[in-house]
Structure formats: C-alpha cells, structure tokens
Image (spheres, rainbow, N blue to C red):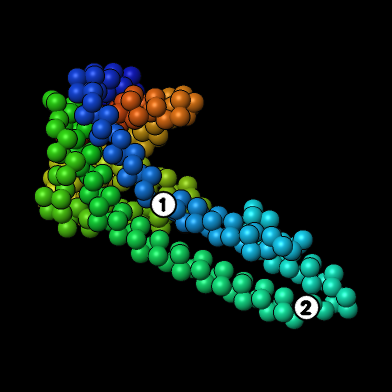
C-alpha cells in the first residue's frame, strides 16, 4: 500500500535534484492545461457584449454589458411595451432586429472558429505534449530526466498517442454529461493513460484503458485525496499571483502524480 507522505517525500527529493528542469516541465504542463477548454470562447463572448453596449451608448435603454442574451431579449420586450400604443419606431426596431441577428451569427461563427482552432491544437499538439511531460516526470524518479522527453510522443508512434488521448478526452467529456460527477470518476480511472503511452508508445487503445482501470481500481478515492492535499499550496500560490505555483507547487504536484503511477505499477507487478 502507498501513503501520501511517501509519495510527497519522494517528489520533493526528485524535484530538488533536478529543480530547473522540473520547473520548466511543470510550466509547460500548466500552459497546455490552460490552453484546453472554453475560456477563450467566454472571453470572446464578453468582448461581443462590450461592443453591444458601445452600440447603444446613445440610447438611454442600452443593454448592460453583463446581461446575457435572454436578459437582453427581456429588456427589449419591456422597451417595446413602454412605447405609445405598444408601437415602436420602425427604424429602431429594424436596426435592433438586424443587430440581434448579427450578434447571434457572430457568436456562433466565433464559437465554430474556436472549435476549429482549439480542438485540433489540443488533439494534435497538447495531448502528445502531455504524454511527453508525464514521461519526463516519470523518468525523473529514476534519475535526472532531460527536457527533450517532452517531445517523446512526436517521435514515437505519434498517431497512436493522438488516437488514445483523443478517446480519453472524449470519454471523460461524455461521462461528464451525466451530472458531471461520473466525468470526475472516469477522469481518475483514465488518469494513468498518458504514463502508459509514455512508457509503451505501441500500446493499443484497449490495453491502455484496461491497464489504467486496473491500476486505479481501489485507488481513485486515495488519488483524489492526494490531489486535495495540495489545495492549501494552490491557495498560497494564488496569493502570490502564481509565483509560488510556478517555482514550487506545480513541479511538486506533477512529480507526486508520477510517483503515484510508479508506486501503483510496482504494486501490480508484485501482486
């Protein structure tokens, strides 16, 4: 059996022996982690709302920049109802209708563009990089790993890594649609897949999922507690605007996760 203290002590030792490379490896992991998701889409939506406010800055009934589309439509109805005899100025009404149509078109066009850009980047670049970074921290447990390990997946059965990591993300997403909790459970079940690919780039999709499931069987909750044990560090990192995270917490946590993989593999091997 493994303990959090054991893994954390091991992680501290290994990070200390190869400090700057671990910092760079964890920084890369953080960057590619931030690159995946819908944050850019949210920022783009906020930008559109900002333009919406500017468009109506001469009208006393302009929409607040923090209102969503439903709220905006509700305000539009109230505005129309306050006009004499329930009528509205034809010119303003037509202009407003065209703007709403334009807004909807732009929103969906931007969303489509983001999907066309972000998804290919995540599938073809971010996921293989994650495999490489996980390999770096796994190898760092046995000696001073070289940063060239982060490019490992691009030179060793790249298509296989892309395929397996794609299905990992897809399955977690689909399970997350079931009230989110199943997605978290599956994310922990598939947690060891990047390490398995990094160690055996020829592994099949079925083997990768099966072995990750076997390694995490009975260990999902303990792995969750391990992650939760870094919460205090992440709070302190936020208080230092991420500086503490960059130079200590992130390498420490990434190395501890690699130590967990190594420990689970050893336990399975000698079981």
Q: Residue at x 15, y 39 (%)?
A: 149
Q: Is residue 152 visible?
A: yes
Expressed as whole percent of the image width and height from the top left, the position of residue 22 reads 24, 29
Q: Are marks 2 and 1 in contact (CB under 8 Å)?
A: no
Secondary structure of residue under mark 1: loop
Q: Is residue 86 above or below residue 245?
A: below
Taking the view exactly as shown, the residue that stands out farthest to the bottom is 90
Q: Residue at x 64, y 59 (%)?
A: 53
Using residue 113 as the reference point, say whether residue 82 is left or right of it. Answer: right
Q: Nearer the viewer, mark 2 or mark 1?
A: 2
Expressed as whole percent of the image width and height from the top left, the position of residue 115 reads 39, 62
Q: In whole angstroms, how far apart are the C-alphas of marks 2 and 1?
A: 43 Å
Depth order, front residue of 17/114: 114
Q: Residues within 10 Å of mark 1 (few under 14, many from 20)?
A: few
Expressed as whole percent of the image width and height from the top left, the position of residue 139 reads 16, 32
What number is the disc on residue 37?
1
What number is the disc on residue 89?
2
Using residue 115 as the reference point, say whether residue 52 is left or right of it. Answer: right
Q: Give the position of the C terminus as an image quadrant.
A: top left
Secondary structure of residue under mark 2: loop
Using residue 230 as the reference point, say whether residue 263 is left or right of it. Answer: left
Depth order, front residue of 61/186: 61
Using residue 156 as the reference point, say whether residue 224 is left or right of it. Answer: right
* Residue 170 position by quadrant: bottom left
* Residue 119 position by quadrant: bottom left
What number is the disc on residue 192?
none
Q: Earlier in the sequence, mark 2 or mark 1?
A: 1
């Amino acid at each position: 059996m493994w303990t959090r203290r054991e893994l954390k002590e091991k992680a501290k030792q290994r990070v200390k022996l190869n400090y700057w490379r671990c910092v760079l490896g964890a920084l890369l992991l953080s960057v590619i982690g931030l690159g995946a998701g819908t944050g850019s889409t949210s920022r783009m939506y906020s930008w559109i709302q900002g333009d919406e406010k500017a468009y109506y800055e001469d009208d006393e009934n302009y929409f607040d920049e923090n209102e969503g589309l439903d709220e905006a439509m509700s305000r539009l109805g109230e505005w129309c109802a306050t006009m004499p005899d329930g009528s509205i100025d034809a010119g303003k009404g037509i202009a407003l209708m065209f703007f709403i149509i334009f807004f909807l078109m732009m929103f969906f066009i931007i969303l489509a563009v983001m999907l066309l850009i972000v998804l290919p980047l995540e599938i073809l670049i971010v996921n293989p990089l994650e495999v490489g970074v996980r390999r770096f921290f796994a190898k760092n447990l046995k000696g001073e790993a070289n940063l060239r390990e982060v490019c490992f997946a691009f030179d060793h059965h790249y298509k296989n890594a892309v395929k397996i990591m794609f299905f990992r993300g897809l399955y977690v997403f689909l399970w997350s649609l079931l009230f989110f909790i199943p997605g978290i459970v599956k994310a922990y079940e598939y947690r060891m897949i990047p390490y398995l690919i990094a160690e055996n780039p020829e592994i099949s999709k079925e083997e990768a999922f099966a072995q990750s499931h076997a390694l995490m069987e009975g260990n999902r909750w303990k792995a969750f507690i391990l992650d939760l044990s870094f919460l205090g560090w992440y709070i302190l990192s936020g208080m230092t605007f991420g500086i503490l995270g960059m130079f200590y917490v992130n390498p420490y946590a990434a190395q501890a996760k690699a130590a967990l993989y190594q420990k689970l593999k050893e336990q399975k091997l000698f079981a």
